[in-house]
Amino acid sequence: MIQFLMNGRIQTENLPDDTTVLQYLRRDAGRCGTKEGCASGDCGACTVVLAEKEGDGLKYTTVNACLTFMPAIHGKQLITVEDLKHQGELHHVQRAMVDNHASQCGFCTPGFVMSLFALEKQKQTFEREPFNREKALQAFSGNLCRCTGYRPIMAAAQAVCEAPQADQFDANTQHSLEKLRAISATQQPATIDQLAQRYLAEPDSRLVAGGTDLALDVTQRYQHIPKLISLSHVAELKDITLTGQAIHIGAAATLSACLPVLHREFPAFGELLERFASQQIRNQGTFGGNIANGSPIGDGGPVLLALGASLLLRCGTAQRELPLDEFFLGYRKTALQPGEFIEQIRIPRVTSEARQLRVYKVSKRLEDDISAVCAALQIEVRDGVVVHARIAFGGMAEVAKRAAHCEAQLLGQPWQTATLERACLALERDFTPITDFRASREYRMQVAKNLLRRCHIELTSPETLMRVTHYV
C-alpha cells in the first residue's frame, strides 16, 4: 500500500512496486499534463515536484516522474502541473511563461514550469539575493526545449525569481503537514535494521534508492521487476557526517545533498557533481547506487577511487569495510554477497595542503551527458618530487579502475615533462579501452594521456586557463 498527498487529499494506491510515477499519473490518475519524452531522465518533460517535511515546513524538489518508482513517494506530497492553477487563475509561474512568450510547441512546457516552481520555492526558503542566472540554469539543466526557446524561458525565470509571490501551497503548508503526518507507516523498511533483516530474508529482491539507473530496465527495456525494496524511508542511510579523519556518506544520501559537502572538501569533486546528469537526477540519484551497479562509466567511481574511499558493507547484523578498489570485480560485477548491501561510503579527508585533486569529464555535451572518459587524479608533490599519486579512470575498462602502472611511473620521480611522458606510456599497460558509440578506443587512450598532461600543466602553471568552463 502506498499513501501520498495529491491535490490536498491522501491517495491510497495498491500498485506493483515497479510502477513509475509517470505511468501512474498518465494511466491511472488521468493527469496527462506530465509528458513522456525520453523515458530515460534526459529531457525533463515528465518533471514533477515532491514536497516533504523538513523542520516546520516543506522542502520542494524536482524529480523525473519516468524514473521514480511509486514506493519512493510514500509519505510525500506529489505536485503536478495540474495542481498549479488556482480558483480559475494561472499560477504566477505559469503566467510568467505566458507573458514572456516562453512556450512554443508546448510539449516541454509543463516540465519547465515545474522546475521553475521548485526554483522559486527554494529561493523563498533559502535565498534573499537577486536573480542568479547560474542557479536558474542549474535548475533547468535537466529540461530540454526542442524549439530552442531558452531565452524567453530564462526571462520568465528572472521575472519569477526577482519578485517571488506567495501562493496556495504556502497558505496550505500547515494543512499539508497535518495530512502528511496522518499517513500510515510504509510497508518498506524504515530503519537500517529492518532493511538488513528483510534483504537477508529476500536476497533476490532489488534494492532501489534513487532508481535513476534501475528504472531504465522498466522504461527502456520493458522488464518487470517483481520484488523491490525501497531505501527511500531509511533515514540512517541518508546521513552525511564528518569526523576528523573521514566523510561518512550514507548509501541513500542524494547527490544533491552530498554536493555542498564535497564541494567544500574537494572543489574539483563538487564541480564534477554539477555536471553529473541533471538537477532532477541529482535530487534522486545516490553514490550507493552509482557504485553498486558496477557501471564502467559511473562518474562517482573514478573520483572515489582516487580519493582512497572505502565502503561499509552490511549483511544482517554483520559489517565489513572494503576498500573501493577491491569492490569492482568485472563488468557490473561487485564483491557484494547475497543479502549484503552498501551502508556507507567513507572518504578520507585530506590534511596536506600540497595534495591536489583534479577531475576531468569528457563527454559529447558539457552537461547532462554520460562520460566517454572520466579521469580523477590525486597528486602530491614535495620539493619537486611526486610523493603521492592515485589515478583512476572511468570509461577505459570494464570497471572504474586505478592506473597502477601509471602511478608507479610517477611515484618518487621529479614532477616534470619527461616523467609525465613515461606515465602516459604506462597507461597503455593499464587499460585496453573499447570502441563504442561514445568514442573509439584510440580516442579514449589519447584523451586519457592528454588529461594526465593537462593535470601537470594545471598544477605547475595554475595561471594558465585550460578548461572550456573558464571565463575571461
Image: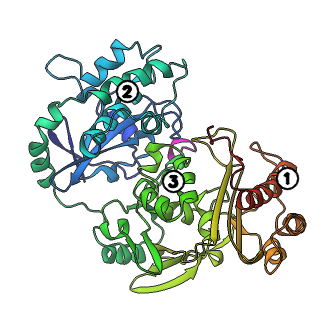
The answer to whether residue 345 is left or right of residue 418 is left
Please give the range of residues in magenta: 218-222
* Residue to which mark 2 is pinned: 157
User: In this view of the protein, can residue 87 be seen by the observer?
Assistant: yes
| Label 2 crowd (10 A; few <14 / some 14-19 / many >=20) | many
Of pointers 3 and 2, the one earlier in the residue sequence: 2
User: From the viewer's perspective, is residue 459 above or below residue 271?
Assistant: below
Amino acid type shown at disc 2: Ala
Circle 1: element type: helix
Q: Circles 3 and 2: CB distance less than 8 Å?
A: no
Local crowd size for mark 3, using a 10 Å CA cut-off: few (<14), some (14–19), many (≥20): many
Q: Name the residue under label 3.
A: 214
Residue tagged 1: 446
Quadrant location, the C terminus:
top right
Q: Is the N terminus in the top left, top right, bottom left or bottom right quadrant?
A: bottom left
Question: Is 340 a magenta residue?
Answer: no
Across and down, in percent, residue 128 comes to 27, 40
Q: Residue at x 48, y 32 (%)?
A: 143
- Lateral position of residue 245 relative to residue 462, left or right: left
Callout 1 amino acid: Gln
